[in-house]
Structure formats: C-alpha cells, structure tokens
Image (cartoon, rainbow, N blue to C red):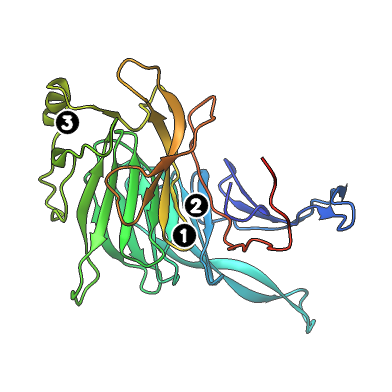
Amino acid sequence: MSDNPDESKGEDKKIDRKNSFEEDQNTNKNTKTNVEFIYSLPGVHQQPVNVVRFSPNGQYLASGSDDGVVVLWTQRQRDIEFGKIEKKLAWACNRVLRGHSSDIYDIAWSSDSKYLISCSMDDTAILFSADKGKIVQRFDGHKKTVQGCAIDPFMKYIVTLSADRTARVYKTTKGKAQLQFYLHHILKYRDYHPEQKDKATTQEDVPMVDKCEDDESMSSLDQQGRKSHLMFADENECKAFYRRTAWSPDGSFILLPASIYKSAPGVKPIFTVYGFTRKNLNQPAFHLPGFEKCAVVVKFCPYLYKKDSSIPRAQG
C-alpha cells in the first residue's frame, strides 16, 4: 500500500484515488463504510504499479512500476464541465524519471521534497532531483535486487536494503559543492556480544568505487571464531518482493525489516526488525520481535506525541 490509505495501485497499470470510511467520533466505531471512486491516473505506466509515495510538501505523487520508470504527478485544476466556472483538482503527469532497467520496488522522498530515491530489481538504487528530473547519483553495490530504500530526514544518510542479505549505508561529505554520497557501512553481521566490537565487520567512508569486504572474506572470518550471525533473512525466509525500511521522523534512528535475531550460536533464529541509532549505524541498538513470518515493511506515524502528564502511571 501507499503512504496514503486512500490510494490504491495494482496490476491495471493505474493509480486509483478513493475516499475512506467515516468514523463516529463519540463511540470510536466505524459507523459507515463509504468507499467512492474519485479518479484514476492511467496512461503513463505500461506495467503494474508497485509503489506510490506522496512528497512531504504534498506537491508531488511518485509512482514506481514494473516498467522500470518513476512517474512524478502534480495536481492541476480542470473544468468540471465545459463552460462551467467550477473546477476540480486532479493529478497529471509532470515528468517521467528513467534510469532503471527493471521493476521498481520502493521509493523514498527527502524531507524537503527536492530529492527522491528509487530501488529496483536491476540491483541498483537511484537518487533523482525532483525539480530537474535528472539522476543525481546511482548506487550499484548490491549483488541482488534492492528491495528497500530510505533517506535520512537531515539528508546525511541514505540506506538501501537488498535480497543479498545486506544493508548499505551511504553518507554525504561536508564541504562538497555537489551533492555526493559515499559508502559508510555495509551491514551484514550482528555481534552476539556487541560490546566486543570487531572492526573487520565494517568500513567507514569508503568511496563509491566499492572496494569493501567481499562475502568470502566475511565468511572466512566467521569460521575462524568471530561471534556473529547474519542479520537479514535470505530469499527463502523472505519471499516478498520488498523490504521497505524507514527513518524515524526526527532522524534519530532507522528500522530495518527482514531481520533475524539469534541470542547465541546454535540457537534457532527468530524474525524481528532491527533498530539502529544514527550515532551507531554499525550494530543494532534494539530489535522488535514477535513475528511468525518475516517482516517486510515498517512505517512511522508522521506525528510526534507528548506524554499526558495528567494520566497517572500504572502501578506494578
């Protein structure tokens, strides 16, 4: 589903806009279900639409499809009827962003709505400029389908999550006239005892040439006794087409789905979602267990809540 519960998408190659149910404010019960078709956005995508995302400022609607393109839609006023003064708002194609060669599985916006990133079955992620409609940077380090992507609210980090059982963290560099990201971390293994840090599990600030650790060296280290396990599920454990990650609205931490947790060697792993703080994007700070199957998507409420001090604390 999209960010908006009133948006739907699917195999008919178009996006539908519908209104949602009404809720009784007094009883907090759904008193009426009134789903009404308003309009659709056909005619641009040539294959099924997989993902739809509103820009934070509400100006754009981005959609990604199996046809490998991202379409940016904007609202325009149209006549309700020829000759009438009344007009209605409708979404129209603003521009088509090209660069992928296969299905697009996720899209994420920057907090200022100037940039968006998409990831694809072609094993890459691409950062686009929404205003110019051009590619800013291509990220091609993953070895399998990139199924999730997220942009830090402060535009300092970009995180991609792939079916190759790794997450890659990219970081901007200060003082650069042109926006550019460099490989900061490759997340693959979790230490059983995080306090026993192993510097071989990550490399920091590596240029995009991608000269990081390869799978063979990592496996060799593990066989030699490093106390760690693979953090992310393989394609048999996670059969979905996406692993959609998300930053918290304040940018303090990021959640990564499709994760697995083991408390010790030989213990049966459990499905979970790992949380990483922006101060330490090397090892997870916490995890959210309780899933019978692999978690494939996480999403934050955009609102920040404050605790009501008038409510007494529960005892015990």
* Residue drawn at point x = 18 percent, y = 74 percent: 176
Q: Secondary structure at mark 3?
A: helix
Residue 241 visible from this viewpoint: no
Is residue 8 in sight in this rendering?
Answer: yes
- Of the two numbered discs 3 and 1 on the same chain, state the one appearing first in sequence: 1
Local secondary structure at mark 2: loop
Whether residues under marks 2 and 1 lie with C-beta atoms below 8 angstroms apart, the answer is: yes
Q: Which residue is mark 3?
A: 215
Residue 271 in picture, x, y percent from top left: 46, 28
Evaluate if marks 3 and 1 touch, with contact meaning CB atoms under 8 Å apart.
no
Residue ID at (37%, 44%): 285
> On the rendered structure, is 9 left or right of 137?
right
Specify whether 78 is left or right of 263. Answer: right
Task: Residue type at mark 2: give it.
Answer: His
Closer to the chain start, of discs 2 and 1, is 2
Q: Is residue 82 above or below residue 17?
A: below
Q: Amino acid at mark 3?
A: Asp
190 or 109: which is nearer to us?
A: 190
Which residue lies under the disc numbered 1?
71
Q: In the image, 262: left or right of 217?
A: right
Mark 3 / mark 2, whichever is N-terminal: 2
Residue ID for mark 2: 45
Q: Position of residue 120 (x, y in %)?
A: 36, 45
In front: mark 3 or mark 2?
Answer: 3
Residue situated in front as seen by the camera: 43 or 261: 261
Check if mark 3's residue and mark 2's residue have beta carbons within 8 Å. no
